[in-house]
Every structure is written in C-alpha cells, then in structure tokens.
Image: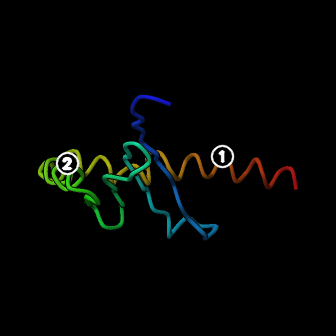
Amino acid sequence: ADGYYQYQMDECVYSTSDYSDMVYLVSLSFNKDVDLQFNSTVGKYVGLTEFGVKQAEYFNKKQAFLQQQKAQVDALCRPNAQILDSSVRDKA
C-alpha cells in the first residue's frame, strides 16, 4: 500500500538459565530496511544505512542515554525473562 512504515523492535536475547549472556538489542527500521541498531554488549548504536550512520553519530554523543540503554538488560530484560521463564517452568 501507499505510505511509509517506521518501527522499532526491542529484544532481550539469552541462552543460559542464569541470564549471564543476556543482551538488549534495539533495531530501528524504515520501510523494511534496518537503519540503526543498538547492542548492549557493544554499548553503542551502529548505523546500517546512510541515514542510520547519522542517527548513530547523534545517539552515540549522548552518554547518559547510552548508559540508560545498556542498563535495560537489568531494568527490563532480566525481570521480564524471570517472570516469563517461571511461568513456562510452572506449566511443565
């Protein structure tokens, strides 16, 4: 259809039961192309398109914002993973 499509996808990725390898990922996309990604392990944004490179430069200058993003592993990911994992284990 006509128009534009912009979206952000946040993910918490892990494979160990103690969450020691947990990573918080953010992808910003426009019309199905991923422009920009954040990885809490890397600790910065990486631009994947010309526009995304400009966005990454902007976000990476904001140290307080980057610290907030890195902290999402403990603030968002771990608590939710613990809740979801326990609800799955309780059903097994």
Relative placement, left or right, of 43 versus 26 is left
User: Where's residue 70, x and y in %?
Assistant: 33, 55
What is the x, y in percent for residue 20? 51, 69
Q: Position of residue 72 (x, y in %)?
A: 40, 49
Q: Secondary structure at mark 1?
A: helix
- Give the label on residue 83, or none: 1
Query: Residue under circle 2?
Result: 55
**Circle count:** 2
Tell me if residue 16 comes above or below residue 25 in the rendering. below
Residue furthest left in the image: 61
Q: Residue at x 11, y 51 (%)?
A: 61
Residue type at tag 1: Ile
Crowding at dot 1, Cα within 10 Å, few <14 / some 14-19 / many 20+, comes out as few
Residue appearing at x 73%, y 51% in the figure: 86
The nearer-to-camera label among 1 and 2 is: 2
What residue appears at the point 47 percent right and 45 percent down from the top-left corner? 76
Element under disc 2: helix
> x, y percentage for residue 69?
32, 49
Up-down relation of residue 64 to residue 47 (above or below) = above
* Residue 23 picture quarter: bottom left
Q: Is residue 22 above or below residue 84?
A: below
Whether residues under marks 1 and 2 lie with C-beta atoms below 8 angstroms apart, the answer is no
* Quarter placement of the C terminus: bottom right
Residue located farthest toward the right when viewing the structure as drawn:
92
Residue 16 located left or right of residue 8: right
